Image: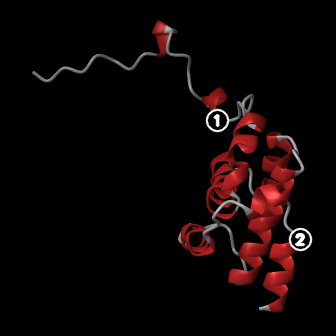
Amino acid sequence: MTGLITWWAALPASMATARADEIAYLVNVAMRPGYGFANADEALRYGHNICQNIADRDPFDAIVDQVQSDLATSDDYQATYLIGQAANELCPALIWTLRHSATNHQAILKTIPAPTDPSTAPPERSDS
């Protein structure tokens, strides 16, 4: 318990003022396959490291790349889900910092055709 208190005291003021929900983070991360954390402490430590990266204003793409490297995956959704869970549940005061950093993140959008391109529109559905 002393380690947790020491850790909490070391947080930047902007992170300590928001209400963190470690249980929600652990439930959301543990229920998804692919993360492979050895235990809850490791998962929390990793999530708090993500929060520190956000607090340090690391570029969103750099955080995504680091998570993908750590998880040995190229799955952008898997990485961004974990980042989102960490921000939402462990450091909610930093959500706007994360959103600002992610403004130009296009990895997912590159696979979605532009809605103005008629050649990519789905075929008309016939119910008759």
In the picture, the disc for residue 108 is 1
Classify 118 as above or below 52.
above
Image position of 33 (left or right of 38):
left
Distance Cα–Cα, label 2 vs label 1? 35 Å
SS for callout 2:
helix
In the picture, the quarter occupied by the C terminus is top left
Q: Is residue 52 left or right of residue 105?
A: right
Q: Residue furthest left?
A: 128
Q: Residues within 10 Å of mark 2 (few under 14, many from 20)?
A: few
Q: Where, quadrant-wise, is the N terminus in this rendering?
A: bottom right
Q: In this view of the protein, which residue sits in the foreground, 96 or 75?
A: 96
Lower position in the chain sequence, tag 2 or tag 1: 2
- Report the colour scheme: secondary structure
Q: Could you tell me the amino acid type at mark 2?
A: Ala
Do the residues bearing badges 2 and 1 touch, measured as CB atoms within 8 Å? no
Question: Quick one: SS at disc 1?
Answer: loop
Compared to 16, does 102 lie above or below? above
Residue 14 position, x and y percent, is 78, 55
Left or right of 2? Residue 128 is left
Residue 56 percent location from the top left of the image: 90, 50
Image mark count: 2
At label 1, the amino acid type is Ile
Where is residue 30 shown, x and y percent of the image? 59, 73
Q: Which mark is residue 84?
A: none
Depth check, front residue: 37 or 12: 12
Give the residue pinned by disc 2: 10
- Name the mark nearer the viewer: 2 or 1: 2
- Residue at position x 67%, y 49% in the image: 80
Q: Residue shown at 78%/48% (left/top)?
A: 64
Classify 63 as above or below 18: above
Q: Residues within 10 Å of mark 1 (few under 14, many from 20)?
A: few
